[in-house]
Amino acid sequence: MIKKILIANRGEIAVRIIRACRELGIASVAVYSEADKEALHTQLADEAICIGPSSSRDSYLNIPSILEATALSGAEAIHPGFGFLSENSKFAKMCNECNIIFIGPSYNTMDLMGDKANARKTMKENGIPIVDGYEGYIKDENHAFSLAKEIGFPIMIKAALGGGGKGIRIVEKEEDFINSYIMAKSEAMACFNNDIVYLERYVKNPHHIEFQVIADKHGNYVHLFERDCSVQRKNQKVLEEAPSFILDEGTRKKMGEIALKICKVVDYVNAGTIEFLVDDNKNFYFMEMNTRIQVEHPITEMITGIDLIKEQIKIASGYELGFKQEDLEIRGHAIECRINAEDPKKNFMPSPGKIKQLNMPGGYGVRLDSAVYQGYTIPPFYDSMIAKLIVHGKNREEAIMKMKRALGEFVIDGIENNIDFQFEILNDPDFNAGKYNTGFLNKLVNNK
């Protein structure tokens, strides 16, 4: 087993990984920016090292500083969490060259699946269902426009190295295409330092369903069922649940088999997620693969009883998976609400600041993954998510009621937050009936 791990991240995911390390008897090293000097992850870890100024570019994205901190601490491995450097193949390769274990897939696999245009091409070549589109070389906006007309409108322009809803434009009309194409490339360059985009037919208001997969170095591949992530705002997830309300057992089995086939095609090792679009007729299409742990991994843990972070560490240490596909079953229903420091009344504007009063929910079947505490000042430099509230019930109805109860206990004074907005989602008749897709949240916001 690995003896010491540096966590190249911050916030609740850093805390989550530190806790898993402690339960496995592994020493943990936190890294932090100057803005995060008083952050919870720096207090919980066995060691903490400052890696730079407040800007993420100068700290959490600063590869030389992180590698230097790893060497100074004597850590054998790095866990990247999600976001920041978690899907950076260059970083994974540098870890390998420095004899540091990167807790995730190989940099070759990350290269293949991180380039979403290339991933589409690979899936097409291996008979995996994908949405019509074009992932080849695009000369300029006029070439792109002619391709878009061949594919048909509405169409999506997507950053090849994108993620987190960035570098995406949905174009309904031909006359809007050129401007949208230029804007998508500009945003892709700003966010990912790469302006390559690809085109994909826009499936209007599909269900966004992803399968959690995990594989060891000994050729064992397992999926841990699905999560429904269709409650989204501007392509960013707000609430997730597992299992999906719309999948029957036959479709679930087929999608799971395809997810594992994809893992084998790309020789995947460690935890990852296969994301699909599913239409109203239960036709499903590969969208992308996330080569890291996901924000919403706790709901999978709740319905399977598998600690995904511990499994990641064990796999990186060379252990075989301790379970097979036939050992797994869906137990009950889980929901996750992302709690953000933002003001829904002001177009979800970020709301950093000091938490003056905090009451965290608890009770049977309630889990809170967070890094905030009373008196903590949320810095303005990073993502606005400050907590994930997760509940587990014997069925979907019980999980919804439990989430409402838990949200009602959650008090955060001093900053604006989206707790009341999450209540609106949970009280919506369409959500309660399971009649929602990726267009649901826009409709809810626009009807207010």
Image (tube, rainbow, N blue to C red):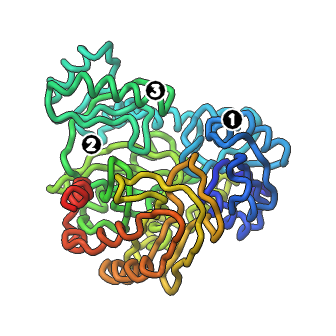
Task: Assign the N terminus to one quadrant of the image.
Answer: bottom right
Q: Which labelled disc corresponds to residue 63?
A: 1
Residue where numbered disc 2 is placed: 129
Q: Position of residue 271 (x, y in %)?
A: 53, 53
**Helix or strand or loop: what does disc 3 sit on?**
helix
Report crowding for label 1: few under 14, some 14 to 19, many 20 or more residues within 10 A (C-alpha).
Answer: some
Residue at image location 20% in from the left, 44% down from the top: 203
Residue at image location 33% in from the left, 47% down from the top: 234
Q: N-terminal of the two: label 2 or label 3?
A: 2
Mark 2 → mark 3, Cα distance in angstroms: 29 Å
Mark 3 → mark 1, Cα distance in angstroms: 19 Å
Q: N-terminal of the two: label 2 or label 1?
A: 1
Q: Which amino acid lies under the numbered mark 3 shown in the image of this protein?
A: Met
> Which tag is nearer the camera, tag 3 or tag 1?
3
Q: Which labelled disc corresponds to residue 189?
A: 3
* Res. 195 image quadrant: top left
Q: Which amino acid lies under the numbered mark 1 shown in the image of this protein?
A: Ile
Looking at the image, is 139 positioned above or below residue 448? above
On the picture, is 367 further left or further right than 170? right
Task: Assign the C terminus to one quadrant of the image.
Answer: bottom left
Residue at image location 49% in from the left, 66% down from the top: 388
| Residue 46 can be seen, yes or no | yes
Q: Position of residue 150 (x, y in %)?
A: 15, 24
Q: Nearer the viewer, residue 182 or 419?
A: 419
